[in-house]
Image (cartoon, rainbow, N blue to C red):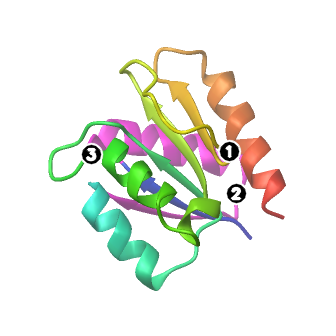
Amino acid sequence: MHKILIIEDSMMTVMFLRRTIQELFPNAIIVSVKDGKEGFSALKTQAFNLIITDMEMSGGGGLEFVLKMQSNSILKKKKIIIYSAKDKPDLPNSPNVAFVSKLENKQVLIDQIKKFLHETK
């Protein structure tokens, strides 16, 4: 069973992501938090197969969250999708981090979710 963490301050986007994931993986457990600080708190107590984060949020941005994840030898192995309407950030190259624009077709997001969750089986 997949367990997915959504880090997003927009409830509309959280609802969209939940619906999209549940259509693909009806048994997935989805946890949502509103910023990077809450994301790290969730990671301390729970294991996730995939993390989907926005880049800019009030209370702690997703970009800072991803950079902190990448600097941690254990956490940098987690699969992360940055889902944002902003331009793709300049991040260290990693096979575990993908950027999907909110302006892209929904299928691009679906394909990336499937790819990462397939890799974590």
How many labels sit on residues?
A: 3
Asked if marks 1 and 2 touch (Cβ < 8 Å), the reply is: yes
Q: Residue 52, percent across and down?
A: 50, 48
Residue 34 visible at all: no
Q: Amino acid at mark 3?
A: Gly
Magenta stretch containing residue 38, yes or no? no
Residue extending furthest toward the left: 59
Magenta span of residues: 8-33
Residue 12 visible at all: yes
- Residue at image location 55% in from the left, 31% down from the top: 99
Q: Amino acid at mark 1?
A: Glu
- Residue at image location 46% in from the left, 22% down from the top: 88
Q: Residue 91, percent across and down?
A: 48, 35
Q: Amino acid at mark 2?
A: Pro
Q: Residue 75, percent across and down?
A: 54, 67
- Residue at image location 63% in from the left, 51% down from the top: 22
Q: Which residue is mark 3?
A: 61
Callout 1: few (<14), some (14-19), or many (20+) C-alpha neighbours within 10 Å?
few
Q: Which residue is mark 2?
A: 26
Callout 3: few (<14), some (14-19), or many (20+) C-alpha neighbours within 10 Å?
many
